[in-house]
Amino acid sequence: MTAGSAAPSQAELDAMVISRVRRSGSSFYWGMRLMAPERRQAMYAVYAFCREVDDIVDEPGLAADKRRGLAEWRDDIAAIFEGRQPKLPLARALVGPTRDYGLEREDLLAVIDGCEMDAGDGLIRPTKATLDLYCDRVACAVGRLSVRIFGEFTPRCLDVANHQGRALQLTNILRDVGVDARMGRVYLPDELLSAHGIDSRQPLDVLGHPALAAVCRELAEEARYHYAKTRAAMADCSRRAMRPAAIMLEMYHAIFLRGEKDGWQPRGEPIRIPRAVKIWCALRHGLL
């Protein structure tokens, strides 16, 4: 938007958000489609925000420019909660959802902080504590925003968000070990790598180590724990409200099971589930 140009209308903001979500091609789209229109549009706005800040870090460019872009988003989040007009169009799209569903400032900022952890060289052999913080910021915080929009919110919904965020993010990390190593990143925790005799900090050396699959299998046990905790917490929440979360849980668990079947051997390409499986998950939960 250029200086002096008119601010986009709400309809234009809505269209911009929908376009951003569709362009991402994410599996989350299937879960969001089940929501009532006004909640779905709010969820789209949150997801568009997440994709936008993630792309700031992932797209080519100088680290200083990336941090500047994230700082602009922090300023706009502050503006939303201080009653000022945000500058970025996608930030303006968050004003209504934040007001209508009580989104927490700390959770929006956590998403930005999590993306910043990937700026520059990104994570290489983080400690378990750092990895857990990363999962909380990039995944659980998104879940905490989402469960407020889903409706019928109770404190138990936060348990769903916190356990599911960890289950899904750890599954992502296990799925993408090879891809991440070639990007110069190693998200597997330092303690596990060291326990299995992997001492190098060079991502490709880690990728080629014969004990890597054993590290992945051990981390997979932590993901399994969070899948179980998610299901237990979800059982205490409204089934109708949790439908989008349940769809995502099933889709990611399908990826988890395929990786488990392979013994978590690092792959050249990430595990993907067929479109038919995604449609089946959406239909199954949409009809329950």
Image (tube, rainbow, N blue to C red):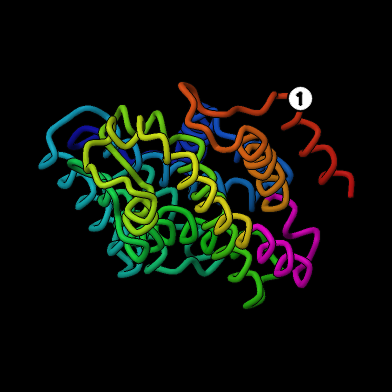
In the rendered view, would you say 70 is above or below 158? above
Measuring 52% from the left and 61% from the top, which residue is drawn there? 145
Measured from the top left, where is residue 64 in percent x and y? 10, 42
Magenta run includes residue 243 = yes
Measured from the top left, where is residue 215 in percent x and y? 45, 47
Rendered image quadrant of residue 58: top left
- Asked whether residue 36 is in view, the answer is no
Measuring 46% from the left and 61% from the top, which residue is drawn there? 141
Circle 1 sits in a helix, a strand or a loop, which is it? helix
In the rendered view, would you say 19 is above or below 197? above
Measured from the top left, where is residue 206 in percent x and y? 32, 37
Measured from the top left, where is residue 43 in percent x and y? 56, 49
Q: 219 left or right of 178? A: right
The stretch in magenta equals 227-244
Q: Amino acid at mark 1?
A: Ala
Magenta run includes residue 42 = no
Q: Nearer the viewer, residue 254 or 127?
A: 127
Measuring 14% from the left and 40% from the top, which residue is drawn there? 63
- Asked whether residue 216 is in view, the answer is yes
Measuring 89% from the left and 50% from the top, which residue is drawn there? 288
Rendered image quadrant of residue 59: top left
Query: Which residue is situated farthest in the right direction here?
Result: 288
Q: Nearer the viewer, residue 4 or 249?
A: 249
Q: Nearer the viewer, residue 172 or 96?
A: 172
Residue that numbered label 1 is attached to: 276
Q: Nearer the viewer, residue 2 or 149?
A: 149
Q: 210 left or right of 228? A: left
Q: Count the marks: how many?
A: 1
Categorize mark 1 by other alpha carbons within 10 Å: few (<14), some (14-19), many (20+).
Answer: few
Question: The N terminus lies in which quarter of the figure?
Answer: top left
